[in-house]
Image (cartoon, grey):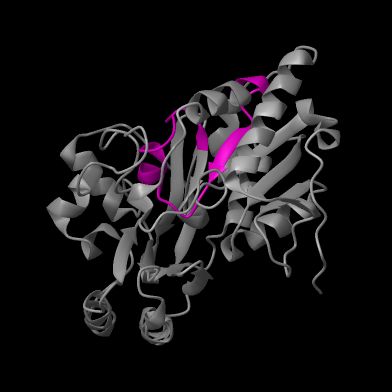
């Protein structure tokens, strides 16, 4: 059942903000959409504001995006917690985790990506399904926003389809080769995911969906197809923004706080649902009905103004709640 969502009063809604856990989508939410994800513009003041908000909330702020962690880190500070690839990978307290392929192509959750570089240990980790996430933090420099300044170095080295951990072989790879030849359409390989963008060729929407559904059938029941704004993505069935939010909410410094999630797209609806079920605050950026979000902000610029007001409110409040001590020590346990 759908409903009309009211406009959000950005002043009255700050009651209790000291105990919030803030989750923020990026494209179309924090930032205006661009013809290509590499061409989004990050306002100069935004990274610093997110750092300060994270500190004021005791560390309980995370970016929640369809972008891989490596793509998030090219836009925003790496020290921020994040949920990437729609929940297929995540970072908490500086440690990275993700869904790893187990035998038979089934996905399982909860491995940490360490910092070791030794080739033999890396081979052992891959054999156990504990793979380093391509494009993750530490594997390339973060840009300050706007155009990334060139082709992704990992993608250039190994080829676009080799970046994904999806079992792309035989019929699936042949179908993707057909998709790559469609004018105005491009494939983005992610850790355990694959996105097909057709924003520059909206007339290809029906063709791209038919081909992606065929790819999905070739991959099998461990994967699902997700639609967004002029994008179709294949993901593990366990991967969703809602699952990512619930996972962090089970761990310090998020545990015991009120979750607040701001998003703009169909891909954010399960996040809205998860936050509503946890008694939190769900906010949609943009117009349109048929959403589970209970509040609305008109544009990304309006959200950024609201975050500025939130920062002022938190700064004027009594000392912020501190992060749960022992969070780093228990992170692996609560995420397993």
> Which x, y percent locates residue 150?
20, 45
User: The N terminus lies in which quarter of the figure?
Assistant: bottom right
Q: In the image, is residue 227 above or below residue 190?
A: below
Q: Nearer the viewer, residue 151 or 119?
A: 151
Q: Look at 53% across and 37% down and name the residue there.
A: 332
328 relative to 33, above or below: above
Q: Judge whether residue 325 is colored magenta.
A: no
Give left or right: position of 49 versus 254: left
Left or right: residue 99 compared with residue 12: left
Residue that appears at 42% across and 31% down: 78
Can residue 324 be seen from the camera position used here? no
Task: State which quadrant residue 104 falls in.
Answer: bottom left
Which of 147/232 is in front? 147
Q: Residue at x 31, y 31 (%)?
A: 115
Residue 318, percent across and down? 80, 12
Please state which of residues 279 and 249 is positioned toward the viewer in this rendering: 279
Query: What residue span does the magenta drawing correspond to?
Result: 55-81
């Amino acid at each position: 059942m759908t409903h009309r969502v009211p406009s959000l009063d950005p002043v009255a809604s700050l009651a209790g903000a000291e105990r919030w856990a803030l989750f923020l989508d990026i494209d179309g939410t924090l930032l205006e959409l661009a013809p290509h994800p590499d061409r989004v513009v990050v306002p100069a003041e935004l990274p610093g504001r997110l750092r300060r908000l994270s500190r004021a909330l005791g560390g309980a702020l995370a970016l929640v995006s369809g972008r891989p962690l490596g793509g998030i880190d090219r836009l925003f500070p790496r020290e921020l917690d994040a949920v990437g690839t729609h929940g297929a990978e995540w970072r908490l307290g500086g440690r990275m985790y993700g869904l790893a392929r187990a035998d038979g192509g089934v996905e399982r959750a909860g491995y940490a990506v360490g910092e070791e570089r030794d080739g033999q240990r890396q081979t052992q980790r891959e054999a156990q399904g504990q793979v380093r996430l391509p494009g993750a933090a530490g594997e390339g420099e973060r840009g300050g926003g706007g155009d990334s300044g060139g082709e992704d170095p990992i993608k250039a080295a190994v080829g676009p389809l080799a970046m994904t951990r999806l079992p792309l072989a035989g019929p699936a790879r042949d179908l993707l080769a057909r998709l790559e030849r469609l004018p105005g359409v491009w494939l983005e390989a992610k850790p355990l995911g694959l996105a097909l963008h057709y924003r520059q060729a909206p007339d290809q929407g029906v063709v791209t969906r038919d081909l992606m559904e065929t790819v999905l059938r070739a991959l099998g029941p461990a994967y699902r197809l997700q639609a967004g704004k002029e994008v179709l993505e294949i993901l593990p069935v366990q991967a969703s923004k809602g699952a990512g939010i619930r996972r962090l909410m089970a761990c310090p410094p998020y545990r015991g706080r009120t979750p607040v999630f701001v998003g703009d797209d169909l891909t954010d609806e399960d996040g809205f649902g998860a936050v509503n079920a946890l008694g939190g605050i769900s906010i949609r950026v943009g117009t349109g009905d048929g959403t589970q979000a209970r509040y609305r902000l008109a544009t990304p610029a309006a959200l950024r103004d609201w975050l500025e007001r939130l920062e002022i409110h938190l700064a004027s409040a009594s000392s912020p709640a501190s992060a749960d001590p022992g969070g780093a020590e228990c992170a692996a346990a609560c995420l397993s």
